[in-house]
Image (cartoon, rainbow, N blue to C red):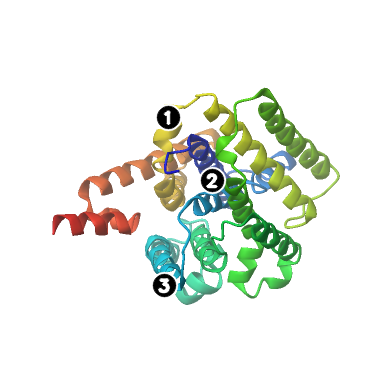
Amino acid sequence: MNRRESWIDCIKVLACALILVGHLLQGLLRTGILVRDSRLDFFIWLIYLFHVQLFFLSSGYLYERGQRAENFKEWIRNIGYKFISLGVPYFVFSIITWLLKNEFVDLVNIRTGHLFDFLFLSPTSAQYWYLYTLFFLFVFIPNVKNIKILMGILIVLFVLYMFSAMLAPFFVIYSIAQYGFWFVLGMIMQRMGFENLAPKKRILFTSLVFLILFVGISSALYSYGYRATFSAWTILLGTLACLGFSILFKYLEAGGVVIKSVTVLSMYTFPIYLLHTIYAASIRTFLIFIGIRNIPVHVVLGIVFGFYGSILTAFLFHKLVYPEFVFYPWKVIKKIKNKT
């Protein structure tokens, strides 16, 4: 049960790469280096249908795979654990981003305001809202191990998704309504034995059908002027993409296909998620400062610095031990306890 599932590594790396690319393109649009056109708009709309959803799906899957809290005391202990593991990086990097935005207006691709609002009322101003939302998903969604209860929760979340725009003033409920569906979908996948899928051709065929339907329906809707978010169509499209990629990567894993570079990168997806905006925005600002506005140069260097600058930082923090606390607080706490 504790064995590593490489299909989740693939999901994390794909989602992380698309999030980096999405933020990079938005930053280039904001500074006027990229000019908005229909193809670019479609690409950004397309990846936002499923890339963050993949993270929530994999988080829900791993949550359901974990040990169930047998009583209230264990539930409180688990929530305390999640508060530290998610809260430390959330507050550290949100505050750093807020300070950078106030000091260097063009450095970080977000809007800012009062720190309290930035942290608690409008966390979507930076990508760290994912941690904020994930914590409350752990708080409110029980790890029940019962497929019928999980299906009921999934239906409730589907309804909330459809009316999520009405919940905008209440960020916690609003974000759970928009992304909790895929978290619970991941839980259901685990409960239904997704890890035991065999590498059969019909599994591969199913994944390809899902992905083809996703691209085909998305293209058709967009060509007819559809630009909506958080509608019946977008939840269908997001589900097709998430299931399509999950089944495809699971098929490859079941067939013994393990890509070592993906396995290595998956070890750094969390630091990349936390740091990529700062690194990509920094190199963009530097290039603009020295007069370079060439699009390929900005894209390539933005991706390289976003990925490998984050990886290098994580590697150095790991070697120094104590700085790694901002990424993995419990890991450092355990090292300190072992030394004493």
CA gap, disc 1 and disc 2: 23 Å
Residue, x 83% and y 48% (percent of image)? 225
Q: Which residue is mark 2?
A: 24
Query: Residue tagged by mark 3?
Result: 73
How packed mark 2 is, by other alpha carbons closer than 10 Å (few <14, some 14-19, many 20 or more), is many
> Left of 146 or right of it: where is 98?
left
Query: Residue 176 or 74: which is nearer the viewer?
Result: 74
Amino acid at pointer 2 = Leu
Mark number, residue 261: 1
Q: Is residue 216 visible?
A: yes
Query: Which numbered disc covers residue 251?
Result: none
Q: Earlier in the sequence, mark 2 or mark 3?
A: 2
Percent x, y of residue 213: 77, 36
Q: Secondary structure at mark 3?
A: helix
Nearer the viewer's eye, disc 1 or disc 2? 1
Residue type at tag 3:
Lys
Q: Earlier in the sequence, mark 1 or mark 2?
A: 2
